[in-house]
Amino acid sequence: MQARDPFSNFDRMRREMDELFGDMLERSGLARPRLAFAPAVDVFYEDGPPPRAVVVADLAGVDQRGVSIEIEGRQLVLSGQRDSSDSAGRLYQQLEIPTGEFRRTVELGADVIADKAKATCEDGMLRIELPLATGTTQRRSVPIERRGSGQ
């Protein structure tokens, strides 16, 4: 199961409209402010050994020392901040790279072993590997207790 970002279609449509109208609404002050930065993520499962959930997050331009990863149950929470570049002496024609604090919750489709999670970051891509909790299912017969005097 993959968590869907409800704003992904909105963001795509907004980018297309911005390109079409050249950000006319923003310059006039009539547009809503842009949504905050939220890193894009991929979630997939690998057979292993051990079998695991893998979350890959696009954190280009984010200092990994300020990134926090928390796991509780089937939720993985990424938080941190992408700082804006020094804008002194610049007059922007176009400004599309989102900055600021972020908090992204990813719903996992399976139970994981949080204590054995590993994270690596290379070229702005954060990869988190979470071993799946593979509990053995036990089969058990359950006897039916008979109650009452006539049975």
Image (cartoon, helix red, strand yellow):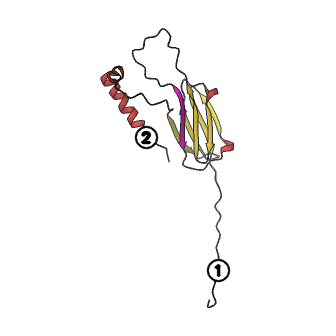
**Which residue corresponds to mark 2?**
6
Q: The disc labelled 1 sits on which kind of residue?
A: Glu
**Which residue corresponds to mark 1?**
145
Secondary element at image label 2: loop
Percent across and percent down for residue 22 are 33, 21
Q: The disc labelled 2 sits on which kind of residue?
A: Pro
x 63%, y 87%: residue: 148
Image quadrant assignment for residue 76: top right
Q: Which residues are magenta?
A: 97-110
In the image, residue 146 above or below residue 64: below
Q: Is residue 60 left or right of residue 131?
A: left
Percent across and percent down for residue 100 are 52, 26
**Direction bottom: furthest residue:** 150
Q: Is residue 114 left or right of residue 97?
A: right
Percent across and percent down for residue 109 are 54, 49
Residue closest to the eye, 89 or 31: 31
Secondary element at image label 1: loop
Q: Is residue 139 magenta?
A: no
Q: Quadrant of the C terminus?
A: bottom right
Q: Is residue 103 magenta?
A: yes
Image quadrant assignment for residue 129: top right
